[in-house]
Amino acid sequence: MATFVTTEMHTCGQPIRIVEKGFPKIHGDTLRKKMDYLIQYHDHLRKLLMWEPRGHFDLIGVILVQPDHPDADIGAIFMHNEGYGPMCGDATMSLGRYLVDKGIVRNSTIPQTVVKIQCPCGLVEVRVQNNGKKTGAVSFLSVPSFLYAKDLSVNVSEFGQIVVDIAYGGGFYAIVRSSQFKLKNDCSSAKMKEASGKLLGELRTHYKVKHPENSDANISYIYGIIVTDGKDGHNEEVTTNFTLYADNAVGRAPCGSGSSARIAQQYSRGLIKLDQTRIFESRTGGKYRATPVKAVSCGDFDAVVVEVSGNGHYTGTSSFSLEEGDEIGKGFLMS
């Protein structure tokens, strides 16, 4: 088996693994077909790199591919413990720096370099601070984000009736206040993860979503849960995001696509206006700034484009292999 070379990064504590070498050629003339090819022929390699003993339950991975969108500089496929995600804003911010630093973006400009990444959810514009010697803070403009459903009542075992909003920010998220679980807003609480996981399971079983313009099945499902402290509406106070996604993975960062979804929720409810900024904080103390910058439409939904800003940092490089006869080394998960 080939040796895999990766660059390791984190965005506000969320570990990001960017695959540089080792994957076989990924066939397909569209990003969706490339993902299908990966699922059919090479999903064992996702498990090899994302799962233990090389990865862990909450790791995010990125594979770079040729885009089919005419305006894209590069295509990105996001991997996690369960499979392949529709979007990862955390990875996108680290990836922005990586693409500029590695010279993959041809037209690097100062003081800001724009990178356009084709993600499964659509084209995402990334803006990287760049002084010619070092890259810095990164922001991205979300795909059209909107409130899909509000005040949806869900019966969750042990916790009773829970009322959520469903919002889209590159993936569909259920947004719920921690007080509904009768829990303190403690992002490190195991009970918070348990409650969020039960809610996610109920929603995926009994409630279906459908994106109004993107027919990709990898988009139209509830990707995660965002538990908040209930501090909605525009003010200068920091508000928290606890994010559970994929197969009950816990986000370390405030969640980029989840921040877009939460802004879309607040905008639709009239709690925030264009160009007003909220600061979202995660369990690590990492913060994102999120601002609705443009009113648009998505199908019949009133939507917004959200600018989300944060910082990605390098943590090292890795070289991975699989020794012959090592069955356990092919990958396993422990949450």
Image: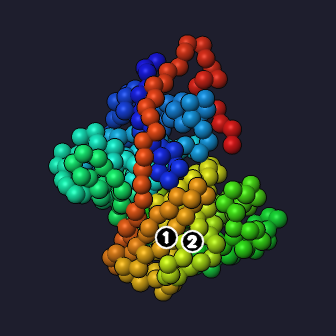
- SS at mark 2? strand
Q: 237 or 229, which is in the foreground? A: 237
Residue 90 higher or lower than 275, as above or below = above
Q: Residue placed at 21% from the left, 48% from the top? A: 132
- Which numbered dot is residue 178? none
Q: CA distance from mark 1 to mark 2?
A: 6 Å
Comes first in the chain, label 1 or label 2: 2
Q: 153 or 313, which is in the foreground? A: 313
Q: Residue placed at 60% from the left, 23% from the top? A: 329
Amino acid type, residue under disc 1 in the picture: Ile
Q: Which residue is mark 1?
A: 279
User: Left or right of 116: which side holds 137?
Assistant: right
Residue 317 higher or lower than 239, as above or below = above
Q: Residues within 10 Å of mark 2 (few under 14, many from 20)?
A: some
- Which numbered dot is residue 239? 2
Tell me, yes or no, if residue 297 can be seen here. no
Tell me, yes or no, if residue 106 can be seen here. yes
Q: Residues within 10 Å of mark 1 (few under 14, many from 20)?
A: many
- Residues marked 1 and 2 touching at CB (< 8 Å): yes
Q: Quadrant of the C terminus?
A: top right
Q: Residue placed at 36% from the left, 71% from the top? A: 305
Amino acid type, residue under disc 2 in the picture: Thr
- SS at mark 1? strand
Give the residue at the far top of this rendering. Answer: 324
Q: Where in the figure is residue 318, as x and y percent of width and height?
A: 46, 29
Give the residue at the far right of this rendering. Answer: 158
Q: Residue placed at 34% from the left, 75% from the top? A: 293
How was the colour assigned to the protein in this rendering? rainbow
Residue 245 higher or lower than 144, as above or below = above
Q: Where in the figure is residue 227, as x and y percent of width and height?
A: 63, 66
